[in-house]
């Protein structure tokens, strides 16, 4: 009883569910300010060109236009999320590098006028030869996209763990296969938006932005606007999904702030859907060759992995993405010897960036597909081969990850059982099949350059608990999960918690929402802050109840003495008593958390423990191929997931289901089609991601481990599950029709073509 | 050097000055929310009547109307700022008590529709006899305004200090005079407004209100809506002046919340100017008789004071107001023996409430006028008589006030010198004169029922300092002053401070803005919070600089060792170093402050030390009477003021100048004219407060004392100066034309009539 959890582990609705359902929740575009102006961005119609001259005079003369800005007007400051990979200006200065590149911006009294005005800006371009294929791009003599970047290869990583040559020599079977994973768009329901306001007295810019990382946006704005960080305040309103696409700063952020500063009026920028598709970020298309050496029994001895990421015109998070795809090859399977080489290559196309899974889904597709291929070649069972190579808690990891808890092999077994592996694999009628694939994902990144997560918990006289957290809820429920953690620690109910988050002018530091680190990082910070507040109350209560503070337990709005549940004081009385004591201090607890690791990886330069902990998961898919239309229907997806102890199983399930659908989209439906640099399908209709009609039956199976580092045992649940639906589905397609697809997406055309060839 | 202040004491513009000047600052009416509805209140056309029946059916049927509420629909809960004096419903239940009383409210999709709908509500009244004069009202047999209140006298206070009978017997001269001070309206530029929003999942009402006291509003809403305090969040946007008028909860607050809860939509109420005049609050008209016993040399031996306040229809802050007018008779002069009796009498008229000075200006008018009368009768100089009776620091006060610092006699001397007292008094040509009057005011109230002021100071990685304070800036500059205090204590600049205040969902507890306590109370809390944050930094820096933390001084963004200014670390480096230490905690300081007094007065029941400290001031006026038109022109007003050490002399001057003009309005221009309960002049045009054209030359003279309790020695500066401009001006009129006016305002008509009588 005393150790049972009250709030953590409950299936509770998100704290802002009603506000969102009723339309009262305020997203950036819902905000208006007196005298607000509206901005619009002029984008490049050419894939690669020098900017010779920009004539803004006609635009400036249009009645209602208040300002025009070009790359020549702004500080000469590159930006980018990874300092060493900065290669982008808020507005292009000398040249444009893809169709959709930001060229100039207009600010006017109405969005329609701004729209009209950008058409009046005359840009003289000198068109340059463009390159759209990374293999062409990396050739000597290819058009130079960024000066000084040899072979357009902006980032290369080569790493060897163990002795690959020796291990290949000891292998019974070595096979090499090549795979391709396409470009997909995050397609968040809320387009990217920003509103900025400037206070000339304080010299302070306040920006409301649909961002995942307020504190990093603050840094990027400070750098590009050339004003101190302390003069930039970033507020994140409700955000309608990000999936990684809202990690970067964009022209809308910079230009809103720029115009606000120069015009002294609030300025709003809202991207339209086409801009979101073309001019924000997408998942990197990746070409991957995997060579694997195995023993006869399926034990992996070595892998050689070569990947080429088609980065598009800029770096964005390239180094991180490449590093992730490398390090996570050694988990969830033991790969004692690995040689990895990866190249990030510029092309004159839309820009690749962080997206749910961030470089790992592409690698996972290759590896999990190849595991099935290898199993077939060696006559082994794909589920068995995964169990045989599974990593376990406490086992060493080639790059130094510390794995305290690991439910991977259990997840393989449970997913296989649930899908009916033994009865179905290889035994279903032609056109129907099952497949599975595994994965692991970090709960954030250990090395955050000293950017810890902070939290402040104030317990009010009214019994309400006001929590300040820097964490950025972008729809995933971070605020609810943090509130549950605080409620549990303080012994109150979720409804007693009020949370204010992600406002750099009010809340403590937080790195933001990426890499699935929020629950562990911000959750631990909030728990520590709640603990500190509770300790203050406990000192007071212990005296009143004549007990030791260590013997007190707070639960369900009461504080009682361990082993003596009758000796009790309500938390309300405790607060009142504390407040009525001689000098009533506000009850304020503060917390801060970074991953406790002596040697965290620095991603590119040093191996080490990448994350505070790691989640593990297996997807098992059952599919049916329509042999007439070529359409693949995902009938059922089992997702067995070790996210430690789930803080809110309902929200975890929501994340898993979203990831499954995202992975299904990548497997079967989605593809950003680019022809000569032009995106051909930049709308929801043409892009065609899966809708409610395509939803499979999804069965989520919890594989609970009680992680010692996560708050109340929690690990990530936000994106790991999106790593492997695609290989699971494509593996199942093989089981259904005996065709091994090596490229994504597996469209009806490809199915029909393959069937035709098979027929021959 | 080391002890000099850097930020405190500087003439710095308010931190939100630019935002207000440019129109980007958001007042309640500037806020809009998606789907917002608009409310309007139906008011009583009768001064006193039973409500027999309210038919809302026609109003409900008007297209666009979303809801109608009457007093019968709402919880049976009286409210009021003083718990024991609660006598008001948010909407009248059984009867109306004045013209303008709140009867019903309508909520519609547009303000115009709400306006139209209230005219469709049919109320059947049974008119009752009404009473408009407090002396009529307190008679036996007068109409009963509130059941159970004998003689319509809702509050009476009788107190004797010393032995008045004996002191009168020992007096050389005893005179009794009667005075009247009229009703005036606060007339804040921003009308009263509220917007409420409801979250059905959390059961939480959020209200944005033009309020002076967010935490008390929360309590009153909780009580009247019958939901827990923790389910009410009050946010104060920018407020355009309050002067006491925005202390009470009003129907707009309750009804906005009620409709938001019942309709599930955001609801806005904005009062029009007529409503502000008639249906909010005004300064109590007061009839005062003073009997004073003096020795021949002018030493006051005893006073007997009888006052009748015309309260209008409800109590509002009546007990506090009466207590203030009583206790502050014993300061700034020594009154060793005092008998006070005061009565608060209901009438069927607009409601009296807190207003700048709060009960004291009326008493001060009587006392300061009578001092001049007595001086004349005894052949003494009015300035001398004030100096003779002046209280001094450390001297006992009849009711137990503890006076640590007192610049009163210095203020008399300086004001008299500056106005040219010796050269001018009694020596100017007929029609021109000088007069003076003194006063004292508390810096807030010591006994706040355990409602302390709290503050949280967060020092961010970017070098910005984020301050959370519950204090409610209503235009006086509280946020700027608190920021200066934090900047000084932390050794940074004002521009490094960002403050978030007066949001019960984010900021710590604070009693609110009244009684001029904000600077001392919230300023001390903020200083303590800054100190705690600084101490954390100092521990770190002391180690690095190999010094004792006690020897460190923070100033001008640097921390250096006392006596060794070369041993220094910038605060930025200190923050960075602290943050980069092993477990980088957020640098968070918390503070809380209540007046340190063992026996604070409980206002009505117990004497004691009323306030943490007391300000002192003297006004000296020079006026000219136009003998043809009867118009009095205030040529010059000297205001010598001991507000301890001013945190921001420019803001202090702004307060003093505003107070002078307010007092001049009361002396010469303003009067809420009521005929049979009907306010006859409820508009800026008809009410006719002084404008820029009437502004006198104002000379403010600082009388600095370094108070041991106020932050950096500060005392109140917000309202004390409004206590005595009226008697100073009327005393000067006597000097000019030899007529003793006993009633306010001294209009041209009264001047001409007096001159005519004098001519006879």
Image: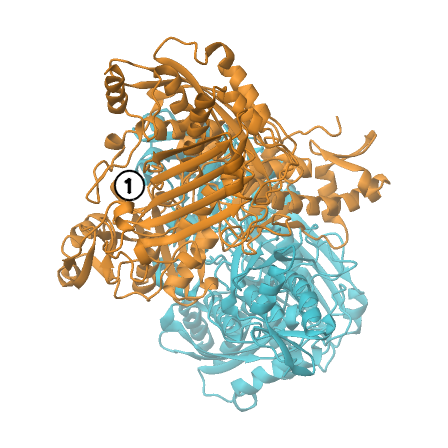
Chain colours: A orange, B cyan
Image coordinates of residue B626 in percent, x first then y, are: 39, 78
Image coordinates of residue A582 in percent, x first then y, are: 77, 53
Which residue is most to the bottom?
B423
Which residue is most to the front?
A169
- Viewport quadrant of the N terminus of chain A: top right
The number of numbered discs placed on residues in the rendered structure image is: 1
Image coordinates of residue B739 in percent, x first then y, are: 51, 75
Label 1 neighbour load within 10 Å: few <14, some 14-19, many 20+: many
Q: Kindly tell me whether residue B760 is visible in this rendering.
A: yes
- Frontmost residue, B246 versus B36: B36
Q: Kindly tell me whether residue A349 is visible in this rendering.
A: no
- Frontmost residue, B659 versus A53: A53
Image coordinates of residue B176 in percent, x first then y, are: 65, 68
- Viewport quadrant of the C terminus of chain A: top left
- Frontmost residue, B641 versus B676: B641
Please tell me whether residue B222 is drawn above or below residue B388 in the rendered image: above
B31 on left or right of B374? left
Q: Image quarter for residue B288?
A: bottom right
Residue located 77% across and 65% down the image: B164
Which residue is most to the right?
A546
B562 on left or right of A475? right
- SS label for mark 1: helix
Please tell me whether residue A126 is drawn above or below residue B348 in the rendered image: below
- Frontmost residue, B386 versus A296: A296
Please tell me whether residue A585 is drawn above or below residue B53 in the rendered image: below
Which residue does the numbered mark 1 point to in the structure image?
A277
A208 on left or right of B395? left
Which chain contains the residue that carries disc 1? A
Please tell me whether residue B436 is drawn above or below residue B535 in the rendered image: below
């Amino acid at each position: 009883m005393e150790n049972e959890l009250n709030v953590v582990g409950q299936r509770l609705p998100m704290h802002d569910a009603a506000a969102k359902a009723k339309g009262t929740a305020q997203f950036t575009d819902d905000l208006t300010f007196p005298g607000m102006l509206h901005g619009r961005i002029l984008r490049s119609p050419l894939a690669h060109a020098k900017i010779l001259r920009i004539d803004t005079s006609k635009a400036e003369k249009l009645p209602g236009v208040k300002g025009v800005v070009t790359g020549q007007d702004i500080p000469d400051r590159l930006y980018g999320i990874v300092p060493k990979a900065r290669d982008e200006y808020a507005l292009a200065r000398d040249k444009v590098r893809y169709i959709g590149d930001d060229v100039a911006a207009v600010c006017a009294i109405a969005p329609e006028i701004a729209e009209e005005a950008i058409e009046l800006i005359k840009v003289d371009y000198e068109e340059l030869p463009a390159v759209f294929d990374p293999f062409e791009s990396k050739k000597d003599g290819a058009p130079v996209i960024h000066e000084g970047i040899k072979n357009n290869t902006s980032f290369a990583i080569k790493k060897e763990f163990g002795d690959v040559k020796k291990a290949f020599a000891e292998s019974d079977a070595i096979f090499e296969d090549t795979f391709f994973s396409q470009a997909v768009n995050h397609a968040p329901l809320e387009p990217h938006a920003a509103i900025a306001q400037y206070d000339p007295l304080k010299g302070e810019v306040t920006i409301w932005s649909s961002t995942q990382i307020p504190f990093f946006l603050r840094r990027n704005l400070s750098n590009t606007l050339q004003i101190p960080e302390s003069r930039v305040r970033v507020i994140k309103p409700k955000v309608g999904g990000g999936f990684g696409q809202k990690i970067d700063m964009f022209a809308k952020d910079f230009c809103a702030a720029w115009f606000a500063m120069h015009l002294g009026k609030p300025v709003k920028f809202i991207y339209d859907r086409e801009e979101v598709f073309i001019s924000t970020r997408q998942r990197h298309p990746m070409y991957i060759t995997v060579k694997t050496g195995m023993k006869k029994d399926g034990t992996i001895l070595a892998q050689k992995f070569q990947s080429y990421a088609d980065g598009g015109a800029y770096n964005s998070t390239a180094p991180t993405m490449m590093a992730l795809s490398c390090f996570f090859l050694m988990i969830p399977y033991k790969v004692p010897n690995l040689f990895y080489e990866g190249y990030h290559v510029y092309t004159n196309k839309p820009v690749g960036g962080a997206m749910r899974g961030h470089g790992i889904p592409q690698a996972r597709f290759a590896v999990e597909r190849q595991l099935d291929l290898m199993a077939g070649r060696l006559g082994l069972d794909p589920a068995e081969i995964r169990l045989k190579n599974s990593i376990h808690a406490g086992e060493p990891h080639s790059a130094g990850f510390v794995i305290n808890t690991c439910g991977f092999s259990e997840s393989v077994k449970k997913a296989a059982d649930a899908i009916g592996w033994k009865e179905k694999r290889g035994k279903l009628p032609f056109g129907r099949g099952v497949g599975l694939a595994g994965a692991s994902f970090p709960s954030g990144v250990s090395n955050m350059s000293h950017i810890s997560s902070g939290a402040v918990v104030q317990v009010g006289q009214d019994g309400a608990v006001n929590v300040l957290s820097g964490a950025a809820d972008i729809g995933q429920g971070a605020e609810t999960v943090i509130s549950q953690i605080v409620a549990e620690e303080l012994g109150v109910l979720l409804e007693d918690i009020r949370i204010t988050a992600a406002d750099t002018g009010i809340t403590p530091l937080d790195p933001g929402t990426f890499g699935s680190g929020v629950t562990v990082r911000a959750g631990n910070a909030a728990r520590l802050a709640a603990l500190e507040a509770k300790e203050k109350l406990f000192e007071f209560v212990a005296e009143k109840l004549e007990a030791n503070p260590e013997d007190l337990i707070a639960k369900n709005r009461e504080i009682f003495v361990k082993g003596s549940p009758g000796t009790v004081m309500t938390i309300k009385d405790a607060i009142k008593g504390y407040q009525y004591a001689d000098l009533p201090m506000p009850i304020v607890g503060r917390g801060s958390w970074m991953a406790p690791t002596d040697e965290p990886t620095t991603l590119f330069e040093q191996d080490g423990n990448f994350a505070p902990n790691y989640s593990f998961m297996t997807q098992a898919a059952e599919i049916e191929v329509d042999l007439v239309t070529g359409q693949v229907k995902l009938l059922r997806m089992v997702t067995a997931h070790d996210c430690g102890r789930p803080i809110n199983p309902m929200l975890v399930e929501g994340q898993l289901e979203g990831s499954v659908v995202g992975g299904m989209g990548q497997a079967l439906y989605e593809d950003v089609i680019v022809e000569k640099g032009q995106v051909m399908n930049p709308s929801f209709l043409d892009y065609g991601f899966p809708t409610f009609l395509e939803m499979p039956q999804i069965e989520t199976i919890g594989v609970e481990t009680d992680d010692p580092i996560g708050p109340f045992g929690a690990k990530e649940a936000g994106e790991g599950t999106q790593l492997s639906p695609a290989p699971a589905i494509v593996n199942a397609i093989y089981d259904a029709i005996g065709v091994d697809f090596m490229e994504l997406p597996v469209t009806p055309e490809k199915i029909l073509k393959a069937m035709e060839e098979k027929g021959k």
